[in-house]
Every structure is written in C-alpha cells, then in structure tokens.
Amino acid sequence: MSVQFIGMIGHQRASETIAPSGPIFDKAYIARFAQAHEQAGFDRILVGYWSNQPDGFLVTALAGLSTSRIQFLLAHRPGFVAPTLAARKLATLDHLLDGRLALHVISGGSDVEQRKDGDYLDHDQRYARTEEFLDVLKRVWTSEQPFDHAGALYRAEGAGSAIKPLQQPHIPVYFGGASPAALQVAGKHADVYALWGESLEQVRETVAKVRAEAARHGREVAFSVSFRPIVAATEEQAWAKAQTILEQARQRLSASGAAHPHKPDSVGAQRLRELAERGERIDSRLWTGISKLVGGAYNSTALVGTPEQVADALLEYYDLGIRSFLIRGFDPLQDAIDYGRELIPLTRAKVAQREAAATRQYA
C-alpha cells in the first residue's frame, strides 16, 4: 500500500486563527472546500463530529455530491443512534457516494462533551459500548438473514437491512483512542487505527501495541497519523510562521472568552500534554505549541519546515509502518491547496523511491 493523504473539511470558514464567518452550514464553502482537496490530490476527507455543530452525515452528503473521485471519512460517536439504524444510514450514504465512504469511530474522550448530548457513561463503559455497537453494525452489513441480538447495551429482534454497503465485505472502519480499553477495541474492529501526531518513539510504541491486540484476533491493522503541517520556502520562515500562528491562536482564544480552555480527560489528550511539557520542538520537526495552548484537546501538533523537510519527517513515520497521513492547516482551505502544490506530490515521490529501492533490494 502506497502512502495515502487525508484532509479535513469544515462546514464554515474557521480555525484556531480564523474567527467563524458565513452561515453555520455554508453550502458553497463546503462544496468548494471538498473540491479543493480533490484537486490537490488528497485521497480522502474527514468530516468531524462535535456535540453542537451541523450533522456530519449531511455535510458528507453535500461534499460527496460536489466531487467525483475523492473518498470520505465520516466521524461518528456510538451511543446516540442505534447500531441497526446507523448501519442502514451508512450503507445508504455509501451508495450515494458510489462506494467512497469510510467510518471513523470515536467513542468520546471528554465527559463534558459527551454530556452535552446526554451521555453519562464513563470512559471504559463508552468503549464497551463501542465494541458492541461495532459487533452489531458489522453483522447488519454482512448478514444475509435477520438475526437477534441481546447484549449488555443493545437488544434487537429480527435485525437486518435490505441495503448493504457497496463496499464489500463492509465500509472500512477507522478507529481512534489511546487507552488500554480503546486498544482492545481497535485490535478487534479497526481496519485503520488513527493516532494524533506524537513523537516517533510514542508512535512506534502504539503501533506495536495495536498490532499485538490485532494479532490476538488473527487480524492486521493499517495506521494513520494526524499532523498540522506548517510549510514555507525556508526553515526560518516556517518557524516564524509557526510563532505567528501561535500568537494569532492566543488572541483568538482570548477574544472568544476561552483563554483557559477545558482540558479533556482522554488518554490521547494527556499524552499530548505530556509531550508538550517536554518542549515545543520534539524530534526534528514536531511542534507542540498549539497542543500546549489547547490542552491537548485534539490533533494539534505540527510538522514545521520546508516542503522537503516536512516530507522527510513524514517518511520517518512511514518507516514505522504509517501509510496514511491526515494533514490539515490553520488556514484550512488555502493550506489544502498549498499542500497539493508541493508537499503531497513530493512525499509521494519520496515514498515511491523508497518502495522502488526496497523492491530492488529483495529482487
């Protein structure tokens, strides 16, 4: 498998450095954002999940109908839609998108965020629910006959679906979560395990743990890592750009009244906070400035440098077994366009050289 690039689109123009503008569900912006990723050479686009934002199913549908080739990754939190209904909704969306859909399962790393939607399960209970949710979801997708299910959290009689995903045996399942409970679910169900951008040492450690869990089920798992690349013509300009982004983000948080944002209690957030405490610059290119500012709240680490330097940094993760990179910028639309000019083609070329050299070595 060669390298894959995943972008991320929003439903209106906004970021850590850009105040929201335009309608909350900006149809023209969503379409233009998706099209920009397709033209830039991304393979897939993530549509995120928030407890107070527009519905991701409909954002994905609009973006999908505005494009023709790029694939989609829809974030979904188990617990608010029954798995039998979710299976039908996702299968229907897969048909609408001509088989371009994948599911990104996030169990929820913040009690505060979950309770906004009325969910009061604790951390490990959420992952137990996710495991059962995926058990039922996959069975609806693959079973040719109606079935009964009686689990700890879900019950159904005569469950089934007339519509199956176009993709067989089922829609690909991406999965995130860094706790021991999360890794167990990942080993059983994930097709792709998604990490936030951590140090090379941390990623190596997590990849080994997930592979071990997957091996217990006779499975193999692919891996994706998320970064916020900050690129410029020279290394000095790139680091200066990073400091400008940090100052703009500080001002934006202060103006919004969130100068001290809530720190999520997820293991992934804790790991990012610990990483940030080690310093702003980790390994050769990893920058933790925004992660420290937001308390490790989401994928907020950056790789900083020229396009070639950032591509070389990505290859270091590629050598650890990472085959997908989720990259998004702080000026989301313009950065997606810019990544397509140099960073994406340059990284693909370097990976192709790496693969060709490996083929010659074993020929």
Image: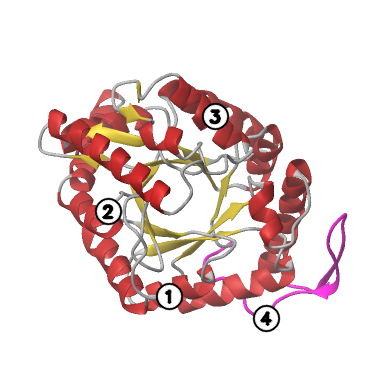
Q: Please report the residue visible at 60 percent of the width from the left and 51 percent of the height from the top.
A: 106
CA separation in Å, label 3 and label 2: 26 Å
Residue 67 visible in the shown view: no
CA separation in Å, label 1 and label 2: 18 Å
Nearer to me, 319 or 16: 16
- Do residues under tags 4 and 3 come within 8 Å of each other at their CB atoms? no
CA separation in Å, label 2 and label 4: 42 Å
Q: Earlier in the sequence, mark 4 or mark 1?
A: 1
Q: Please report the residue visible at 74 percent of the width from the left and 57 percent of the height from the top.
A: 119
- Do residues under tags 1 and 2 come within 8 Å of each other at their CB atoms? no
Q: Name the residue under label 4.
A: 162
CA separation in Å, label 3 and label 1: 33 Å
Give the numbered dot on residue 271. Answer: 3
Q: Name the residue under label 2.
A: 331
Residue type, numbered disc 2: Asp
Secondary structure beneath disc 2?
loop
Residue type, numbered disc 3: Arg
Q: Which of marks 3 and 1 is nearer the N terminus?
A: 1
Count every numbered label the image shows and give the total: 4
Q: Earlier in the sequence, mark 4 or mark 3?
A: 4
Q: Main secondary structure of the magenta part?
A: loop
CA separation in Å, label 4 and label 1: 32 Å
Secondary structure beneath disc 1?
loop
Q: Name the residue under label 1.
A: 25
Q: Please report the residue visible at 31 percent of the width from the left and 72 percent of the height from the top.
A: 29
The quadrant in which the N terminus is found is top left
Magenta-drawn stretch contains 28: no
On the image, the x and y values in percent for residue 362 come to 31, 25
Q: Which of marks 3 and 2 is nearer the N terminus?
A: 3
State the extent of the magenta-drawn residues as a range.
Answer: 143-169
